[in-house]
Image (cartoon, grey):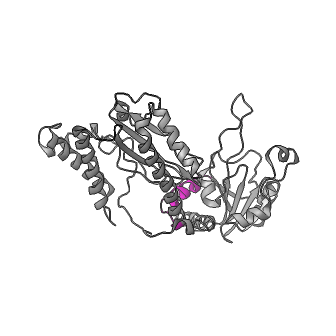
Amino acid sequence: MADIDVENVLKGKYPAKAHAKRVAEYILTKIPDATGIIYLEGRADALLEDSDEPVPFRQRRAFFYLTGVDAANCYLIYDIAREHSTLFIPPVDPDSVVWSGLPLSPEDALAKYDVDSVLPSTELNPQLARLGGEKPDSTVFAIPDRVSDAVTFIEFGRKDFDILGEAVDECRVIKDEYEIALIRKANIISGAAHRAVMESVRKASNEYELEGVFIGECLKRGAKKQAYPSIVAAGRAAATLHYVHNDKDLAGKELLLLDAGAEWQNYAADITRTFPISGKFSQKSRAIYDIVLKMQTDTIAELRDGVSWDDVHLLAHKVAIDGLLALGILKGDREEILRARTSAAFLPHGLGHYLGLDTHDTGGHPNYADADPLFRYLRCTPTFLSLF
């Protein structure tokens, strides 16, 4: 995948049917005799509390993964045996057309999305009744608390609200070529925005100016959404892992930490860099920067099939300890410092996380109850790292 042609790959459709098939196959590994349908709802339109302004729309990730649809008030039925997906979209509402324009037609939706058929949402319950009536012993697989009150599964003999959420989360871990292209596109845009901030920092006086530079550069390149709220932290504020204020003056500060990433078609980028506001590191800050750089390069060099992610995370701590000992910031025996978990004060978070439809994507299985402070906030805890 190293030479993937991002723009060429993204000319095709989002591979929703392949994802639906993968999810169905996962269900069959857990329930070998499973028959019936997968049912998913997209996010519904909603208004802000005490306002007639809309809540910013964010599609449900499970729905998007199986449809590629980033629109409100849509539904999916996937027939497991037939491997057939039906997308339900809102019918034309003449009143709303005046305000919002014409919605996507069924014909346009069928051409745009990787589904087998498209029907108006007024046909949803009749279709559910027909499918359940044809096979009354079959199962409808859905996600709890994500089924509208008006939807009925009464004709289905069995309802399973347990396995589908797990199936989608686990299937999302391994990305296909199209998903990797989306993530790379998000990172290409985010990388350009990071460089724009670096070029602007000496002319800025406040953190929020640089946040504006980052968001503006993303918008110029077509990325209208951010994967998460940007962290623009000058000076000591950078020591707060999820600093959110982004409103302090830059005067008298040495370093700026920028943790920011755009979304591209719902897929996230996540990039963090620290650089000198003046354009030149001091001797002390450069020494720390070089330790972090070595942590990154050494851990990347360890990534290969079969390696334990815990071991890679542990390596980062060992490199940090060696570097801090060399600077005289830590004193004592290397192994004793590691056993005492002293380095967790300098690296309290985990080494990396999955990236995809969420910034902290599914499948990492963090254990926030871990008694070991070195691993408590490790958001990626598979036994082995699989490269693909």
Q: Is residue 237 left or right of residue 123?
A: left
Q: Is residue 92 left or right of residue 23?
A: right
- Residue 341 visible here: no
Instruction: Name the spot of residue 353 as percent of width and height, x first.
Output: 41, 51
Q: Which quadrant holds the C terminus? A: bottom left
Residue 289: % across, % down: 27, 44
Front one among 370 and 154: 370
Give the x, y percent position of residue 175: 50, 63
In this view, the residue in front, 182 or 303, is: 182
Residue 299 higher or lower than 371, as above or below: below
The quarter of the image holding the N terminus is bottom left
The image shows residue 29 at horizontal and vertical percentages of 52, 66
Q: Is residue 168 magenta?
A: yes
Left or right relative to 65: residue 316:
left
What is the residue that sits farthest to the right in this orientation? 94
- The vertical placement of 258 against 64, above or below, is above
User: In this view, which residue lies farthest toward the left?
Assistant: 332
Residue occupying the point 73% across, 49% down: 73
Q: Nearer the viewer, residue 9 or 206?
A: 206
Q: Quadrant of residue 373?
A: top left
User: Which residue extends farthest front?
Assistant: 203
**78 inside magenta stretch:** no
Residue appearing at x 73%, y 63% in the figure: 86
In magenta, the rendered stretch is 161-177
| Residue at the outermost bottom position | 82
Q: Which residue is painted at 72% across and 58% down in the image?
A: 156
Q: Count how many numbered circles sit on residues in the image.
A: 0
Q: As rendered, which of 185 and 83 lies closer to the eye?
A: 185
Left or right of 352 in this view: 16: right
Q: For residue 161, say whether it is visible.
A: yes
